[in-house]
Amino acid sequence: MVASAHSRRSGPTELEVLGFLTDQSGVPLSLEDFAIPLPPPATAELGTVVVVGSSMNAGKTTTAAALVRGWARAGLHVGAGKVTGSGSGKDRWMYEDAGAAEIVDFLDFGMPSTFGYPQERLRATMVGLRDTLARRGASVVVLEIADGLLQAETHALAASLPGFADGVVLAVTDALSAVAGVEIMHDLGVPVRAVSGLLTASPLASREAAEATGLDVLSPAELIAGGALDLLSGATVPA
């Protein structure tokens, strides 16, 4: 069932439900039946960095994977997780290919898609992801929040980042989105540490965003080459 779609999208794939997986008594099984429990509080030794975006397709997963790669190349035990979205192996595989030693996402906490779940459940899942990764030995954690800052669930989670995230990287498509995204995060009390995303494919747009926001604009290659480590040391925080 599709409520609305971009005009360039073709029709949805149509599926026929043939039956349900059940337990031995015939009761249909749910992903909730296999959800891992929320762990006791824990923090990663070197901190938690959260990647948020100005919109869909802004380069959030590529940015998160670049952070993972930069830290893994430095010998760190990296944890990565996806807080919200729809069930797919793509993001998990990108984290794994980048070198993440520990990976969990919302699927592990019983949600095939986070659409429609209450904000309290999503916030608890975000904290649970961090705590799970830290308890599994991750010395640094990166978490990715799906969609864009104007999307209701994403905006609410972003408002929960003060006191939770040790750093936030904003992935954007253009310089104007960088300015607006930084302002939205500032209004929420969340300072952005650096800008990345699809915007970095354009040197001109990158320079514009850096001048307008006063923040470092780091491409995935720059994050891998040392920018990810600089984020942990606070080197990208503007004076």
Image (cartoon, grey):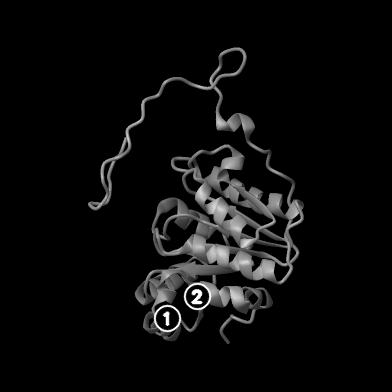
CA neighbours of label 1 inside 10 A, class few (<14), some (14 to 19), many (20+): many
Relative height, residue 43 to residue 223 (above, below)? above
* x and y percentages locating residue 39 in the rendered image: 72, 44
- Residue 86 is marked as none
**Along the polypeptide, which appears first: circle 2 or circle 1?**
1
* x and y percentages locating residue 231 in the rendered image: 62, 75
Q: Quadrant of the N terminus?
A: top left
Relative height, residue 188 to residue 114 (above, below)? below
- Residue 219 is marked as 2
Taking the image as drawn, is residue 232 in sight? yes
Describe residue 206's horizontal placement relative to residue 14 as left or right: right
Hey, which quadrant is residue 67 in on the image?
bottom right
Contact flag, marks 2 and 1 (Cβ < 8 Å): yes
Secondary element at tag 1: helix
In the picture of the structure, the residue carrying the numbered disc 1 is 206
Find the residue positioned furthest to the left.
7
